[in-house]
Image (cartoon, coloured by chain):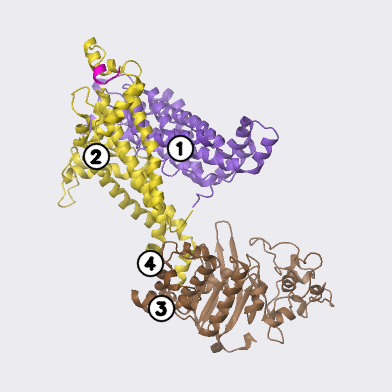
Amino acid sequence: MFTYVLRRILQTIPVLIGVTLLVFSLMHLIPGDPAQIMAGESAPKEQVENIRERLGLNDPYPVQYWNYISGVLQGDLGNSVRTGRDVTNEIGVRFWVTVELAFYSMILSIFLGLIAGIVSATRQYSFSDVTLMIVALFGLSMPNFWLGLMLIQWFAIGMDVPSWIPFIENTAWFKPSGWGSFEQIVLPVITLGTGGAAIIARMTRSSMLEVIDQDYIRTARAKGAKERVVVYRHALKNALIPVVTVVGLQFGALLGGTVLTETVFAINGMGKLVIDAIQARDFPIVQGTVLVAALLFVLVNLLVDITYRYLNKRIDLN
Amino acid sequence: MPNTNKSEENILEINNLQTTFFTEESEVKAVDGVSFTIPKGKTVGVVGESGSGKSITSLSILRLVDKPGKIVGGEIKFKGENLLDKSETEMRKIRGKEISMIFQEPMTSLNPTYTVGQQINEAFKIHEGLGKTSARKRSLEMLKLVGIPSPEKRIDQYPHELSGGMRQRVMIAIALACNPELLIADEPTTALDVTIQAQILELIKDLQQKLHMSVLLITHDLGVVAETCDYVAVMYCGKIVEFADVKSIFNNPQHPYTVGLLSSLPPHDRDIEGDLPVIPGAVPSPDELPVGCRFAPRCAHASDICNTLPNLVTNENGNQVRCWIYSDKWDGNPEVEVNAERTT
Amino acid sequence: MSEPAIQQPATTPPQPKKPSNLWMENFKNFYKKLRKNKAAMIGGFLILFFIIVAILGPFLTPHDPDTPDVVNKLQPPSAEHWFGTDHHGRDIFTRIIHGMSITLYVGFFSVILGATFGVLIGIVSGYYGGRTDSFLMRCMDVLLAFPGILLALAIVSVLGGSLRNVIIAVAIFSIPVFARIVRGSTLAVKKLEYVDAIKALGASDIRIIFKHILPNVTSPLIVQATLSIATAVLTAAGLSFLGLGAKPPTPEWGAMLSEGRNYLYSAPHVAFFPGIAIVLVVLAFNILGDGLRDALDPKMKK
C-alpha cells in the first residue's frame, strides 16, 4: 500500500509539470502580441512595453518558464495586469467560496445519487426505477446554467401560489445572488449538484445490479439474512467501490461547473474571477485560477485513487 | 427403497416440482415435474449434464431461484411441511438454520469485503442472536471443525487471502454453523483441483456422520456419486429419468441415458483401448424440447412410442425409471438390452 | 453539469475479433443489434428529426430570425409567436429552429475533430508502445487534469471567443477519452498472435492498423462519440452563455439564454425555451449513446 501511494504520488509529478507548462504556454498561444492584447488595441507604446517588461516577455521561453515555475513553487502567481494586485491574493480570497460551493454540491450529488441509485436498483423495472432513471437522464442532459436560471425564476423571483393553498403566498424563498447565507446557498448548490447526482445515481444503479447477481449475495440469502441486510450489508458495500472513482471524476466536473454557476448567481468565487479576467484580457489571473483549479483536481484524484485502491485491495491483489 | 418409506423417515419429499423461467419470448421449464425424496441421514445425489435443471432444483428447495425464474407448481415437504406454503420470513428462519447450502464457486461465493470470521459470525447472529464475542468463539470452533489450519489467523483474513479449497471449507463452516438437518451441496467440488476435491468430499462425508445430517449432492460427476451417495437421481432436460440406490445405478442401470453416462466414465479397473464412448448428439436447447421422451433423439433404441412422454415407473426393486422399454407398451425391439452397450 | 458523457465511457475494449471480420460485416452486425434496442432507435430517430429540422426548418419558419421588431419585444408565447419574442422583438421559435444547425454543427464537428486526433494518438500510443506511449499518455493525463469545462475555457480565452474557436476548444477537450479507448483496444489486438503472423508475412503497419485494429474499435468509438456529442453541445452552449462563443445576433442557444438572463423578471420565456431546446438535443444523444452501449457492448449491458 505504501509503495502504491508513493508510486502514485511520483506519477503525478510529470502531470503537474505538464499542467504548469500548458498554463504557462497559454500566454504565448495568444495569436498576436500578448502584451498589446492585454494593454488594449489602442494602448500607447510605452504601456505595452511596460506590460511586456513586467511579465518578462522579452526573456527567452525557458527563462520565462523557469521564472514562472519558481514563482509558482513559492506561491507567487504574478500580478494582475489590470489592477496590479497579487494574483495569489485575489484567488485566495475567493478560493474557499468556490471550494465550499463545490463541496456542498458534491455532498448533495452523493446523497441524492446514492439514494436514487439504491432505490432504482432494488426495484428494478418498477415505476419508481423507471421514473428515477428518466429524471436522471434529464438531469445529466440539462445545462446547469439553464437550471440555475429556472431556479432563480421559480424560487428566488418566485411564483404566486393559488390562494387555496394555505400559509404560502409566493415561492420566492431564496436569494438569486451572492454567497454566504442559507437563502443564498440553496439554489447554486442544487444547480451545481443535479448533474452529479444524476451520474452517481446511474452509476450506483448499474453497479448495484451487477453486485446483486454475484454469488456471494446468494450465499447471504442462503444464510437466512433479511433482504435489507443483503442489500445494505452485502451488496451496497461492494457496489460503492466503483462509485468512488466516479465521485472523484465528478469533482472535476463540479469544479469546472462552478464557473457557470458562479456566473449565474453572481457569486464572487474563482469561477467568476476567471470569467471576469478573460473578459478583461487579464491573463495572469486566468493562468493562476486555471492552475489552482487543476492542482486541486489532481490532488482530489490522487486521494480518490488511493481510497479506491484501499477499498479494492481486498478484492483484487494484482 | 426410498419411495416406500413413510414421511417421518424422509427429511425431504419433493413432489412434482416445476420451476419455470419466464422471458419475453419464451417460457423455459427448467425443472419440469421433479419428484424424489431424501431419507433422513442419507445422501442423495442428483446427476445430470449442465442445463438438466439439477442446480435449479436445489435452489428451488430453499426458494432462492433468481428472477425471471419462478416455482410454478408442486410441493417441497421438509419434515412434513410444505416449504412452498411458507412466508418469506418463515423461509429465512429455515435457510442456514435447518437447510443450508454450499455452492459451486468458492472463489466468488464469499463476500470479498468481509473477513472470514464476519461471514461465519453472521449465521450465528441471524439464527442464534449471538453477540460478537460468543459468535467469534463459535466461528473459531467451526473453522477447526472444517479442518482449517491456524484458524485464529484465518478468521481475520479476507477471502482473497485464501485458496479455493480453503474458501470452500469456509463455505462449509458457514453452512454448518447452525447444525442444519439438510445440507444442499451444489457442485461443491467442480471448481477445485482434483486432490482438493477428494478432501472436500471426505470432509462433507465426515461431517455428515458427525452431525447426522442428510445431504443433497448436486453433481455432474458420477465418480463423486459413487463415493458419497446412497441414492441417485439422474436428471435430463428438467425431468428425472432414473432414481435408484447407488448400487443399482452402477451395477444395473436402466435408462439408456444413465447407461450412456456410465459408459463415458473411464473404467478404473482396466486400461482403455481407443476412445471412450460418448452419447451422440447434444442436449436439446430448452425451448426446443422434443414432445415425447426428452432423450429419444439421442437414444440408440428409440422407437415410435418414444414420441409420447413416458412416466416415471417404480419397478419391483423400488427403483424408478422413465423409459418405455420397461413397459408393456414397448413397440421397439423386444430383445433390446440396454445394458449391453456398456461392455462394448 | 457540463460533462455527462465522460463518466461512463464504454472503456472496456471488446474482445478483438478475428481478421476475417471486415468493415461491412461489422456494420451489418451493428445495425442488427441496434434495431433490437428500442432506446437507441428512439434516440436515433430524434436526432434524425433534429437534422431534418436543421436543414429544412429555416425555410419553413414564418419569421426572420434577425430582423428586430421593437414594437413586439418580449411578448409572451402566443399563436403568432409560439415561444414569444425576445428583447428585440424577434420570434424565439424561429431563432431556435435556425440555431439547430449551429448546435448540431458544433456538436458533430468538434467531436469528429477530437475523435480523429484521439484515434490517431491512441493508435500510435498503443501500437508503438514504449516511450512514445508514455509520452502521449502523460500528455492526455495533463489534458484530463483540467477540471470540466475549464480546459475549453482556457483555450477559448487564448484564441478569442468565436464559434470556430469553441469547436477547436471542445475538440481538444474530447481528445483524451478517444485516445484512451483506442489505445486500450489497440493493445488488446496487438497481443493477439495473428497480428504477429501477418507482420511476419510482411504486412505494413498501416495495413495492420486499418484492416485489423480499427475495425475492432468501431463499436466503443461510436458509443463514445455519441455521448461526446452530448457533452460537446453542453460545453459549447456553456461557452456561448459565458460570452466566449457565438456572438449575438447569432441564434446560438447558449447565447440566447445569456440574453434571456436579463429578462428573468419580466419575460422568463426568453431564457426558458432555448434551454429546453438544448435539453432535448442533449437528451437525444444521451439516449442514443446509452442504447448503443447496451446494444454494442454486452459487458456493460444491464
Looking at the rendered structure, whether the residues under marks 3 and 2 are on a common chain is answered as: no
Q: Chain of mark 3?
A: B
Same chain letter for marks 4 and 3: no
Label 2, residues with CA under 10 Å away: few <14, some 14-19, many ≥20 = many
List x then y, in percent, for residue C151: 36, 32
* Residue B85 numbered mark, or none: none
* Residue named by callout 1: C177
Above or below, A26 against B114 in this view is above
Would you name the residue on which mark 4 appears? Answer: A229
Colour displayed for chain A in the image of the structure: yellow
Bounds of the magenta span? A51-57
Amino acid identity at mark 4: Val
Disc number for residue B138: 3
Q: Looking at this view, is B304 or A195 the one in front?
A: A195
Q: Is residue C130 left or right of residue C139?
A: right
Q: Spatial distance from mark 3 to mark 2, Cα to Cα? A: 53 Å
* Kind of residue sitting beneath label 1: Val
User: Chain letter of disc 4?
Assistant: A
Tell me if residue B170 comes above or below residue A34 in the rendering: below
B280 left or right of B151 in image: right
Disc 1, SS: helix
Q: Is residue A291 visible?
A: yes
Picture residue at 64% right of the left edge, 37% below the top = C22
Q: CA distance from mark 4 to mark 3?
A: 21 Å
What colour has chain C? purple
